[in-house]
Image (cartoon, grey):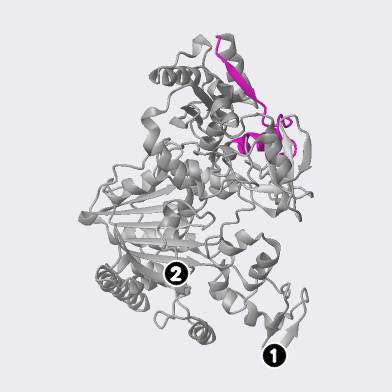
Amino acid sequence: MPELRGKISAKLAKESLLAFRSVAREQALAGDIFPLIRYEWPELIIKDPYELELFAKHCIRKDNLDLRLDDFQVELIRCVFDGKHSQAFMGGGTGLGKGFCVGGIITNLWYSLYSGPIYSKIVMVGPTTDHLIKNMFADTATWRLKMTSHDSDCEFIDDPHVEGMVDKKDRRHTVTLANTSSGEAISGAHSPNTLYIFEEASGIPSEYYTNALSQTKFLIAVSNPRLPSGWFYDGYPKEFTNGIKTIQSSAGPRKILSVGAVDCLNVRAKRLSGMLSPVCGIDIEGVSFDPGEVIPMDMKPLVRPLIPGQICFDRCESLKLTRPPDEVEWAVYGRFPRSNKMLMLFDPDWKAESIKRHSEIKSKILSKALGLDVGGSKTGDPSCLAIGDVQGVKSLTVFREKNLAILKGLVFATAREHGIDLLTGRYPVAIDVIGIGQMMADQMELEGVWVIRVENNGAVIRNKEDYSNRRTEVYGDLAEYLDPKCVAEPLALPDDDMLWEELHAIEKIFQSNGRRFSLIPKRRAPSQQGARITDNRQSIEEKIKRSPDRADAVTLYGQAIRELPEFMSTTTHQFNPSAKLKRYDPFLGTGDLLVTYWSGKTKKVTKEEFVAEFGSESPIPFGTKIF
């Protein structure tokens, strides 16, 4: 009899659970997703009365306070399923719980809710497939296995070209990981309920976002708001700083969230990652602790995290003191960094004028010089070829080919499409001769190609006053071609989001004299992994999650055009008929000028002496840098 009662009880419990799930699914389809969250992940339900009081005290929201979720997570989840929004943009620092919320909860709920006849396709788009596997999709897999209704019919895709998850019974029902570095699995995601998720959205080209809009029922873009440029940045109103708001966009109602560490529940409630007082000290229920002081274990319930895995108060306070101002803006306060033009080599204000000029004269730009950045990899860094003349870049072509011979053939073929026969030796091709670029340069020279060897790890050639190494000089040359203070007409560059994002990510590292500078490195050397680079800033790859291949190609093209006969007549001679003057600046504290000659000599002169030597018809104002 006890065994029979046990079987009956188990059967009734199972039937009750299935009935609850059925009701929860109906509520979810009607716009209330939270009963289904309680069913699928009971571990998220708060049962401790003391913790329920804490959530009620520190949370801003008034509903679903029994769920171990932060306010921004509740709002983000709600907007995806309430039927009132078509997009959600989530900006915020590291450690807030964005991946758990989007990858772990939203992805799995969407996949389970829209199944069967109303099947769905979920496409995760990231910088690389490997990045998605280690981050967003890792949360999907982890929290899928924790679901009450974990479906054994769901399996991971085992395909060398596609990663993700698929329903064994209906293979249209998928979660696919798309790779922007190869372009695979991004298009063709048509279904009644397609969800696009952009991870590290700031680094995803705008064409992928635009393409997704025509296929998606809902789109989520998640990113650290590191850079004030690109489609993710443009998705926020300029007057918006941080918080949560619904706005109208051309693609429909968009929920925008910008959250920093200070907004997290663990930080607001002053919860700690350990039992040491933070760098600012802490007061716990009237007991004060100095920085670094050990907190007694009997007080652990008062400081342990309310949301496990989320950033805590002590970590937040450390970020404020140890990170540079631009990183503090996005990591701590959830704001896009204010543009620090003193550190940025490429002023964001130059972009609009350069793109405008490109749209006006593109048909007039000739194919005379080339810049080739050799990456030589199908899955890693691509190769990039920039072609143009002294007016601007006519074309920017990306190759994903690891075979050097095939890559060389693609470069020759692309050049021919633009009327260039490289074998004539009449067209300069600038190549960075570090690593595999050296091999490409050697092979091209053997075939008679005019190769300009650029040694980015070498010494400065022309401007030792400003630049500390050749790489900085090469990029500095390109910056001068774009600077309206240096040129009458800026170099015309294409409206390419990835190119401009790469240029805007480049920052100066000033030396002690306050004038000479180097640049933050492209990538961190293996021996530097886990360490901060000079000046406590990130490498370019850490900022944009890829190598700046387009920017490298354009800077190399900038060196190639210097070999064209018309270069001097359209730059130095245009501004300085005597061709003796390289630069002149205000001499601080006086009305005099500091003159720099092409010979390298410098001299302090008065304005009258300047006019007497160089003429009074100079078309540029005092204090202007020229080539």
Image location of residue 208, percent across then percent down: 37, 45
Q: Is residue 488 above or below residue 535?
A: above
Crowding at label 2, few (<14), some or many (≥20) Cα neighbours within 10 Å? many
For the C terminus, the image quarter is top right
Image disc number at residue 55: none
Residue 534 vertical position relative to residue 61 in the rendered view, above or below? above
Find the magenta span and give its range: 448-477
Q: Amino acid at mark 2?
A: Gln
Cα gap from disc 2 to disc 1, whole angstroms: 31 Å
* For residue 486, side relative to residue 200 (left or right): right
The residue that disc 2 covers is 73
Residue 319 on the magenta span: no
User: Where is mark 1, residue-wise?
Assistant: 286
Image marks 2 and 1: residues in contact by CB distance under 8 Å: no
Q: Is residue 473 magenta?
A: yes
Relative image position of residue 545 (x, y in whole percent): 54, 46
Q: Principal SS element in the magenta part?
A: loop
Can you say which quadrant of the picture contains the N terminus? bottom left
Residue drawn at point x = 54 percent, y = 75 percent: 265
Report helix, strand or loop for mark 2: helix
Question: Can residue 482 be seen at all in this image of the molecule?
Answer: yes
User: Farthest residue in the left direction?
Assistant: 117
Within-10-Å neighbours for mark 1: few <14, some 14–19, many 20+: few
- Label 1 secondary element: loop
User: Picture quarter containing residue 211?
Assistant: top left
> Could you say where residue 70 lies in the image, as x and y percent from the top left?
48, 73
Residue type at mark 1 is Gly
Up/down of 323 relative to 456, above or below: below
N-terminal-most mark, 2 or 1: 2
Question: Where's residue 360, x and y in %?
Answer: 37, 37
